[in-house]
Image: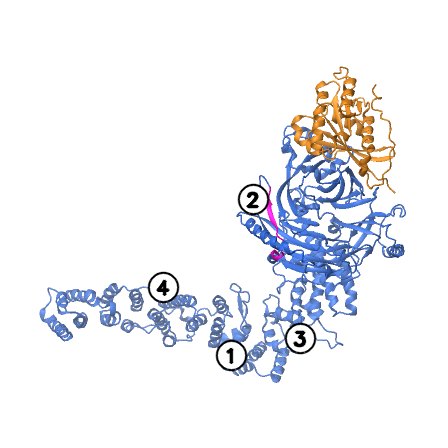
Amino acid sequence: MVHVYNCHPFASQQIVQVGQEPGLVCCGGGALFVVATGGCKVESYSLEREGCPLICRFATMGTVKSIQHSKIGDYLVTIEEKNSATYLRAYTNWRYQAEEKSRVGVRLLGHLLRGASVGGGVQMEIIEIPLSERPVAVACCPITGDLLVGCENTLVLFTLKTQNQQNLSQQNLQSSWSSTQQNSSQGQTSSQHLSILDFERCVIFHLPKMTPKQVALCGGYVAVQAELEVLVLKLETVSELKTLEESSDTNKSADCVDEQIDFLLIPRHQELLGDRAKDCDLPVSIEKTGLEDRRQYSLSYVLFRRFSPEFFQGCSVEETQLHSLQLYPLYTSNQSVSADDPACMFCFFSLPTAGYLYSLKGGVEPLSTYQYPEKVLEAVLTDHLLHVITKSALQCFTVRCAAVAARIEDPYIDTTMRACPPGNLEVCALRMQLFIGLRSVCVYGRHVILLSTADTEVPDEPERSTQRRGLGRKWTMSSAKETSPAGHGWNIYVVDTVSPFTLYQEMDEYSQRYVETNPQAQSHRHLLSEAHLLLRASLVQMSRQQQDRGGEAAAPPQRDADGPPDNDCSAETTRQELDEAFRHNCALLGDSFSRGSQKDCHLALPYYRMSGLSITEIMSRNRPHPSSPHSFGPGFLFYLKHFLLEETDQTLSQEAADEIVHIFSQSEPSMLVSVCASPAMSHVSPDRTLQILQRLEDTASVSVPMTIAMATMVLRLDDLPQYTQLMERHAEMMLVYGFIEEPRLLLHGGGGGHNTHVRPTALSRQLASSQPGLLVAAMVALHENNKVQLEQADHLFKELSCANSLQVDFWEAMLMASSQDAVIQELLFRLSSVYIDRLTNSDTHSSLTQTTPRRRSLKSADDLISSCSHYGALYPWLTLLSAAHTTSPQHQEALHKLQSLLCGPSLSVGSVVPLLERLSEETMWGFSLHLLCTTRRGQYGSSIEKLLDRCPQAIIAFANHQLQDEHMPLWWQKLLPELCKRTRASPDNSILLAALKETLVVVAMEMSPAEFLELIPDDGAASYFLPHLMTCTQRHLLAN
Amino acid sequence: MTTKTSLLKVILLGDGGVGKSSIMNRYVTNKFDAHLFHTIGVEFLNKDLEVDGHQVTLQIWDTAGQERFRSLRTPFYRGSDCCLLTFSVDDNQSFLNLGNWKKEFIYYADVKEPEKFPFVVLGNKLDVTERQVSSEEAQQWCQENGDYPYYETSAKDATNVAVAFEEAVRRVLAMDERTDHLIPTDTVKLHRKPRSATTCCS
C-alpha cells in the first residue's frame, strides 16, 4: 500500500534560459550540462547561483548520445557518434572553457606525457578512450571517480588516475602556476587542486549472456541492467587468486544452457539475494587488464532480479523495460569524511509500473517497492526522496534509507533503549507537480532538473490544455520567470525541493490535524514514522555538512560535490532545532504506541526515552479524560513497569508515586508489590498504599511478598506491633522465598551488575536488629539465586554498620550453602582472617575493648562443625593443647572456628600462613594454630620436635592421629630416635618415658625383629627393650 | 525552428613549425602570437560559420608536427572530413614532406576512397621574403596529386586564411555522398561554385 499525503515537497521553480533545444541533460559539480538536440555542443549552467547563469560552453567531438558527470575529478564522460562510429570520451578541465575560443587538448587514454606541459597553461582536455566494442552505457563511481562502461557483452572498468600538475611539470612550474592562478581568479575555486586526469583500463567483465542497457558503479559494487534483468556484483581486491577458476567453471556450464535458450521463450520472474544470486544462470568472468596493477580481484554476486514481460499489467510488453538503475551510497553521521567506504549502499531500479529499492550492505534485503499510479519514465533516488517523472507530472515518494542508516549507526536501535521506524515501513507519495511532456529528470542536491518537450507529433491537445490549467492552479509557489510559452515547445525547469526538515514540519502539522479527528488510526502513526525518518535524514545530512566544513581545510574538496547546496538547510535550521523536533516527534510516537493496541506497544518505551520527557510528563500525557471510559494503554503500562523495575536515581514525588500505585491498582494489580518495592517509589504515601494492598489481599489470596510489602508500609508508619504481627504470619523460610521473589524489598540498586552499589531498605535495617538470622538467610538465598553478588551483599552489610558481626555470620552461612568453589575459597580466606583478627584483638586489648559487648554469633563453632563440611572436627590432640589456657568465650569460639577450618578439608593452608605470622607462638593456643599449620603442610618432623619441646604429653595423641599410613615410618625414623635422645638427656622425665614406651609398642608391631634390633640404641639397657623385641619376634613368627 | 548544425572535422597536418597552430588561431580568434609553443599531441578549436546558407561548426584539429609526437596525433585522424596539408614557403623540406603527410593521413584515417578525399594544400608564411618554394612548384604538386586546391596564406598578416577554411568547408559539403553529415537529414542541394583556388594567388 502506498500512503498518499498532501505534503508539499517542492519549494520553487525556475526556468533555465537555454538558447537551443536541449537533447540531453545531466548535472553534477554544481553545474547543469545541456547538450543541444543533435548538436555537438555542451552548455553548462550554474545550479548554485540564482537564475542558473551560463558557466561556459564547449564543443564535443561528435554527436553526444549519452553524458555523465563525475563528481570525483569533475570530468564529463560521453558516448558520441560521428560518421556512424561510436566513441567514448572524457572531458576534463571543462571549467577552463569559459572563453570559448580556448584550444582544447586531445589525447588517447594512457598517453599522458610526463614532463611535457602544455605551454598555454591549464587547458580543457579530452581523453579519447578506445574500446573494442561499441559502448552502450557509462557510469562514474561517486566515491573514486572510476569509470564503468557497458558494451554489448562486456563491462569495462577504468580506474581514475590523477597526477598533480605541479609534480608533472617541474621545469614549467613558474608559468603553469601563474596561469593556474589566473584561471582560478576567473571564478573557479576548485582549480586550486588542479590535477591531470587519466584512466587505466583495469578489469573487463565478460557477460556472454547479458546485454547491458544501463550500468552503475559505486565503491566496488557493479550493477548492470538489461531489458528485464538486473545483476549486482561486488568486485573486491584479494590477496589470493582463486575466483578466476571458479568463474571459468561457470562459463563452461553456461555453454550447455546456451543450447536450450531457444526454447526458453519467457523467462520466469526471479529474485535472488546475496550469495544465492550466483544461481542466476548469467555467467560472469573477469579479466584483469591493468599493466602495473598487481592486485587480484574477486567477484561475488550480490543481487539478481529478473522480471517476466507479462508480469505487469497495464503496460505493453514492449514498454515493460527496466530503467533508472542506480547505486546509492549513504554515509552515517558518525562516519569521518575521509572514510571511503560508505556505511550503507542501496540499489534502485524501476519498471514503468513499479520501482524497487534494495539495501546491499549488512545483508542484501529488499527495502521498498514503489507502486506508481501511472507509467513512470525515469526515477532518481536521493537521501530522503525518490523523484519520478511520468509524461505529465513530477512525483515524490519517501524512502527508507535513513531507517537503514540509523540501524547501522546505532546498535541500540530495536532495543528498549532506542527505536526507529522499520526499513520496510510502507512508503508514501507526496503531492505531485504537473508538467507538460516531461522527458528526463536529474537531481543535484535539492535541485530537481526536468526537461520537458511538448511532443508535436502526438495529437493530445485536449489533455494538454487541462494539464496546463492544473499547473496554473496548483503552482502557487512558483517563482518562475515565464519565458514566452509560445516560442518553443521545450523547457528546462529547476525545481527546488524543500529541506527534509521543512517537510517534517508540514507532516507534523498535518499529523496534528489528523490526530484530532482520528487519533488511533494506523495512518497517524505512519505519518509520525514518516516524519521521524525525515528528521533522521536531516540529522545525518547536518552532521555530514558540519564534518565537511570542519574537514575542508585539510582535505581536498572532493566529496562535497554531491551533497552540496543544502547550506540554506543549516542556515534556517540549527542543530538545536532539529534535536528539539526529534524529541517532540519521539514523544508523539511514544504517545501513539503507549495508547495503541497490544501489538508493538513495547515501542512506547524507547520512543519515550528518546523524547527526554520525565516520567511525570509522560504520566500527564497518558492521563485519561475524566469523562472517557478509556483506560491506560498497554504501552504506557509497559513503559511504567520498565521505569520502575530499572534502577534509576530518580525518586518520584509522593503525588506521582501515589498516582502510579493508583494506575496499577486499576490496570495491573498483580504488579503492585513490585511497583511498591521500586526505589523510585520510596515517597509513596504508606497509609494509602497499605489500604490498597489490604483491599487487594482481601480479594486475591495472601502472598508472602504482599505481606512483606505491607509490613514495609507499616514500618514507615512506625507501627511496630502491627509490623511484628505481619512478619509472624509466615515462617522464616516462606519469608526467604518472598524475598527471592522480590529482592527489592530488602535492597535497592545492584541491577546494573557487579559494580553498582546496593542500599539496604528500611525493612533490611529493621531485620538486622530484630531478625538478623532471617536477614542473613535471605541474603544467602538471594546470592545463591543470583539476585545479588557477594560484593554487593558485603556492601549491604557494611551499610547496615554491623560489619564485624552480621557480615561474618553471612559468610559462615554462605559457606554452608554455597557450592561455587571460587566463592568458597574466598570466604574461607576471609573467615580465617576475621578469626585471626578476633584472636589478636581480644588477646592484645583483652579487657579494654570489651566495652561494646559483641552480639553472639548466629552459629557457634560446634554448629558449624556439625553442619558445614568445610569446618572439620577438631583433632583429638588439640584438646590437650588448649586445655590449660583460659580465655573469654568469644576468644574460645574464634579459636575453635579457626582450628576447625584448619582441620577441615577445604581451607588452603598456604594462603593463611602469612596471616598466622601475626600470631605469637608464646601462648599455647597460638602454638596450637602454628602446629596445626605445619602439620597440615606435612612438616611432621618439625611438628614432632616442636611438640616435644612445648607439650610432650600430647605427642602420643598427635602421633596416633597424624603418623599413619605413609607417615608410619616416622614413628621409628623420627619419633623413636627423638624420644631416645631426649630421655637420654633427662632420664627422669616420666612423660617422655611413657611416650617412649608407647612408641616402642607401636614400632614393635610394625617392624621385623631384625629391623627392630637395628633401631635399639647402642647405649640402651637391653632389659628395657627386650619385652618389645619379644613382642615383635612373636608377632613376626605368628605372621609367618 | 532552429537551424540544424553540421559538425565538420578539419585536420591540419604538416611539418613542425610551418605555422599550423598560428593558422588555426588566426582563423578562430583572429590573433597572432609569434612565440607560440610547440603543440603537443592534438588540440582543436571550434568555429561556427555560415557557408552558402548552411550553419556549419568547423572543428579544426591542430596536430603536433614533430616526429616524436607521431603516436599522440595519429589516433585522431579517424573521422576527419577534410585534411589541410600545410607547408611553409620558406622551408623546402616541409614542402617535400607533403607526400609523407598525405600518406600518413590516408593510412591512419582509414580513408575508404583516398582519391576522392578532400585535401586542401596551404603554403604558409607568405609574409617571409626569402621563399624556398615557388607558387608554381606547389600548384604543380597539387595538380599531380589529385587536383587539390592550393592557397598561399600568412597567419601573421591574416592573408587568405579564412578563404582557405571556407574552401575546405565547400569541398566537404560539395561531396554528394557526404550529406549524411547533416543532422537530421534535411539535405539541401548545394550550388556547385567554380573553384577559385587557382585564382587567388596568381
Subunit of label 2: A
Numbered disc 4: secondary structure: helix
Q: For marks 1 and 3, give the CA distance.
A: 27 Å
Q: Colour of chain B?
A: orange
The lab-note entry on whether marks 1 and 4 share a chain reads: yes
Q: Amino acid at mark 2?
A: Arg
Question: Which residue is disc 4 drawn over?
Answer: A912
Q: Amino acid at mark 4?
A: Val
The answer to whether residue A991 is left or right of residue B32 is left
Q: For marks 2 and 4, give the CA distance.
A: 64 Å
Q: Quadrant of residue A195?
A: top right
The magenta segment? A277-289
Mark closer to the chain start, 4 or 3: 3
Question: Which residue is disc 3 drawn over?
Answer: A663
Residue closer to the observer: A151 or A784: A151
Residue closer to the observer: A349 or A637: A349
User: Does A894 appear above or below A162?
Assistant: below
Q: Quadrant of residue A913?
A: bottom left
Subunit of label 3: A
Question: Which residue is disc 1 drawn over?
Answer: A735
Q: Residue A282: within the magenta?
A: yes
The answer to whether residue A316 is left or right of residue A463 is left
Mark closer to the chain start, 1 or 4: 1
Q: Amino acid at mark 3?
A: Ile
Q: Amino acid at mark 1?
A: Leu
Question: Which residue is disc 2 drawn over?
Answer: A295
Mark closer to the chain start, 1 or 2: 2
Q: Which residue is painted at 47% across and 74% down in the image?
A: A776
Task: Please rate how many residues cluster around mark 3, counting C-alpha atoms within 10 Å: few if below 14, some from 14 to 19, many from 20.
Answer: some
Task: Check the image and name the residue furthest to the bottom.
Answer: A698
